[in-house]
Image (cartoon, grey):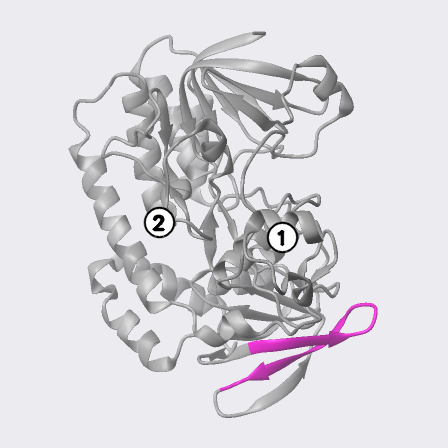
Amino acid sequence: MAERYDVVVIGAGPAGLAATAAAAAARQGAQVALIDAQAHPGGQVWRRDVSHAAPSPARRLLADVQAQPGVTWMAQSQVVAAERDAVLVEDPRRADWVAYGALILATGARELLLPFPGWTLPGVTGAGGLQALAKQGWPLQGRRVVVAGSGPLLLAAAATARRHGAHVLGIHEQAVRSTMIRFAGGLWRWPAKVLQAAALRTRLAGVRYQCASVVVAAHGDDRLREIELDGPGVRRRVACDYLAIGYGLVPDVRLAQMLGCRIEPEGAHARVLVDPEQRTSIANIYAAGEACGIGGLDCALAEGAIAGRVATGATAGLDGLMRRRKHARAFAARLRECFALDARIRALADPDTLVCRCEDVPLRALEGLHDGRSVKLATRCGMGACQGRICGSALAEMGLPAPVGQRPPLFPVRLTTLGDTGLPTC
């Protein structure tokens, strides 16, 4: 083993940053490694924006992490394999095993993208994907953008697009208006969320928010030209340059699966099971944030702090953090209830719609296949560059057999990594 740390944290989003700060502060002299694939910490929520400063909570937490002398920041590094006492980390220069006394999984989430005719056209992105592109400098000035799908991420994506100069034509939420009114009526329990929503709507003044409205198709030639909307009560086409569409988030549990942590339930929304102190079913492995179920920023910060402290033996005085976690998880449960997907969303794909973009597999190719292994063997679905991260979640959400199983490497790696590190591949 080239390196060994008391605590290794995987993921530098809010949960990972909170865990790192807590672990380093809880035990003087503890050596903590923070590993992330991005060049800058912050994860997807606090992704570095080339044009605008990070929000103040992010700046405060980043400063706290940077002030801890025992923290090693491993940027542009991906965990491609794992064993019970070490992870294999590949960066742009090399790959090596990193050993740990305790491991904290803060692997976050990814967008749930569901196939529909035209969804692979250039110009169609995830809602969070458009946010990431905008923050990285993708030119949106004057471009016509439609944001659609479900959940509060739509407001955030639209606000980011507008902040970067896009002309946001509308926000189309699949949930019905009565559900949205009921959801808003219960927000008094979370006053900070009311203020956050009000701030977003202020930034989106003049942008129409349409309920019970679903994108059923995208049309174009070499790129997106227009979208087809259904509802409420009418079907129409809208010309646009970009469509940002997403149906919420799903936990990223692939590394936890590889390590043998208990995962429940099956399907797209599988999450890592943890006890009240964020311990997984495997000794000395902890999980925090979205990997434990989609809970949002407040939940990620509380769970990360709990995991960081417990991983270093500082189990006293966690009551306040646990109360914060309970409050945040209650809000997440309400989100899941109110933004539950309508059945028609799962049935938009026609037989010719690609369900695996990497391997160009249409829906019709899955006919007669009854399990994930057969899907892989017969169609190569899930065997492309994304290794089933997109199509696997989509097919599971659609109630279809999805590619299953997780073996190393988690991401494409260099041949030297395969040859020099003893990486098992079967």
As helix, strand or loop, the secondary structure at mark 1 comes to helix
- Report the Cα–Cα distance between label 2 and label 1: 32 Å
The residue shown at (28%, 61%) is 334
Q: Which residues are magenta?
A: 215-231
Q: Which mark is residue 200?
A: none
Mark 2 or 1, nearer chain start: 2
Question: Where is mark 1, residue-wise?
Answer: 375
The residue shown at (47%, 23%) is 66
Q: Determine if the magenta segment contains residue 258.
A: no
Q: Is residue 289 left or right of residue 327?
A: right
**Vertical order, 287 against 69 (above or below):** below
**Vertical order, 64 against 70 (above or below):** below
Instruction: Tell me the kind of residue under disc 1.
Output: Val
Question: Where is mark 2, residue-wise?
Answer: 295
Place residue 288 in its image quadrant: top left
**Vertical order, 64 against 269 (above or below):** above
Q: Position of residue 260 (x, y in %)?
A: 43, 29
Task: Note whether residue 262 is visible.
Answer: yes
Place residue 240 in its image quadrant: bottom right
User: How many C-alpha atoms fall within 10 Å of the one at disc 2: few (<14), some, or many (≥20)?
Assistant: many
- Farthest residue, direction bottom: 233
